[in-house]
Amino acid sequence: MEKIVNLCKRRGLVFPTSDIYGGLGSTWDYGPAGVELKRNIKEAWWRDIVQSRNDVIGLDSAILQHPRTWEASGHLQNFTDPLVDCKGCKQRFRADQVNGRRCPECGGELTEARQFNLMFRTFIGPVEDTASTIYLRPETAQGIFSNFANVIDTQRVKLPFGVAQTGKSFRNEITPGNFIFRTREFEQMEMEFFVRPNTDEELKWFEYWVQARFQWYVKYGINPAHLRLRPHAQDELSHYSRGTTDIEYLYPFGWGELEGIARRGSFDLDQHAKFSGKDLSYFDEESKSRVRPWVIEPAAGVDRAMLAFLLDAYDEDVVEGEERIVLRLDPRLAPIKVAVFPLLRKGGQPEKADKVREMLQRHFTVAYDQAGSIGRRYRRMDEIGTPFAVTIDHQTMQDDTVTLRDRDSTEQVRIPIAGLVNTLIERIGWHC
Ligand code: GAP
């Protein structure tokens, strides 16, 4: 993990938040390369979950929701972790993460456990009182449930169908840590898949989404040996769940949750119908009756996915006798798709390289670098996983061809500038 954290800082993937003030515990900012990687992960998810399917549509609901939302969803009452305080050093711990009654830091006596609500509280408007108390959402899911009636009233949807969204969520975690694995502000990619309310349909789609989501990580480069499915035991289920299976990744600190797929039944629609007094049922043409659908929810974290993709892509090898660090990221996820280098800073090469860069920028994220030895420039790009590098050299000036270098094999082929865009689209596998 240490190596990844250092690489992330050195190459502008992830910086500690408020670095100049000494940081803000377990909070991270995404740098120029990190923001591109994150965007690509969300883009890959959106393409596969929304764009390429006929049964899922998108949504983008607000982070601030009506406070009744969290009463109805059960988060006000149930979204808690057991907390203990050390009477000596005053540090706080999750009760389920300490052994015995002694502080793991100073050995002091610990208090009895009490429930601590993980939602961040704030006020809406200028008056700070109970009536104006609202919460930062702890999951994006509730914005989907509270828009259920809007969606079925305005869209031609037929069961089964899904509503997907990505966005920030906030949890006042007692023990955040392990880099971007557990933070208090993070981004989710969630989809609520509504099915006919019977166990056959529910289990069929649950199995489908567990497999589909497992394969999604494999599709974008994660070694399946580093992934496993773990069904939740009855006593660890969230308050809304009838059954959950986690997709876990083998992080350097052990197996940990990457994504959870939950059977939420009609819990949320039932609760919102009760609390809002609105009819949240759906007219099912097939059975000619009004039903309240059940829900299968694949809920992923962007930051955790990014950590897993980075860890799995990290490699060290030797090229021409020199050690290098290389991120073997899937080209679709790579922050920068192609680097453009003039071999020399003279002979018209920089001007030509600039033209090539302009051409490529219409299609891809491009880096341009003309400083230092060509080997050093390749290494910098290898370290952020740039899959291709184009070099403009003496021969380019004569016949309009360039060399195209492959990050993984380091092999170079010479191709005409006119064919570059198509070659790259083909090799990246995406129209950007
Ligand atoms: N709507 C269901 C839900 O929120 P969850 O298992 O609590 O379920 C879903 O969260 C995903 O969100 C997790 O699998 C994880 O990837 C991500 N996640 C949850 N808490 C997180 C945190 N504190 N930091 C980073 N990611 C987190």
Image (spheres, rainbow, N blue to C red):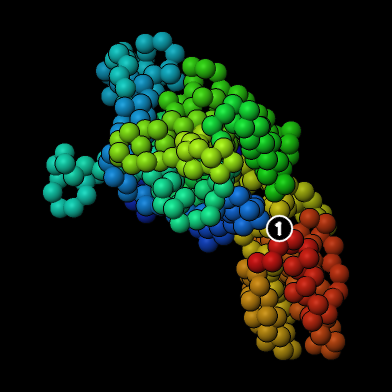
Q: Classify the position of the N terminus by image quarter.
A: top right
- Number of other residues with Cα within 10 Å of mark 1, as a class: few under 14, some 14 to 19, many 20 or more: many
Image check: 203 left or right of 271?
Answer: right
334 versus 360 height, above or below? above
Which residue reaches farthest front?
288
90 versus 311 height, above or below? above
Q: Can I make out residue 219 in this image? A: yes
Q: Which residue is mark 1?
A: 331
206 versus 28 height, above or below? above
Quadrant of res 374: bottom right
| Residue occupying the point 16% across, 41% down | 131
Image check: 126 left or right of 346?
Answer: left
Residue 372 pos. (x, y %): 67, 71
Residue 37 pos. (x, y %): 59, 56
Image check: 235 left or right of 224?
Answer: left
148 versus 233 height, above or below? below
- Identify residue type, mark 1: Pro
Can you tell me whether the CB of the residue at mark 1 lies under 8 Å from the nearest atom of ligand 1? no
Between 150 and 79, the residue placed more toward the observer is 150
Residue 162 pos. (x, y %): 55, 46
| Residue occupying the point 30% across, 35% down | 275
Residue 79 pos. (x, y %): 37, 29
Q: Classify the position of the C terminus by image quarter.
A: bottom right
| Residue occupying the point 73% across, 36% down | 224
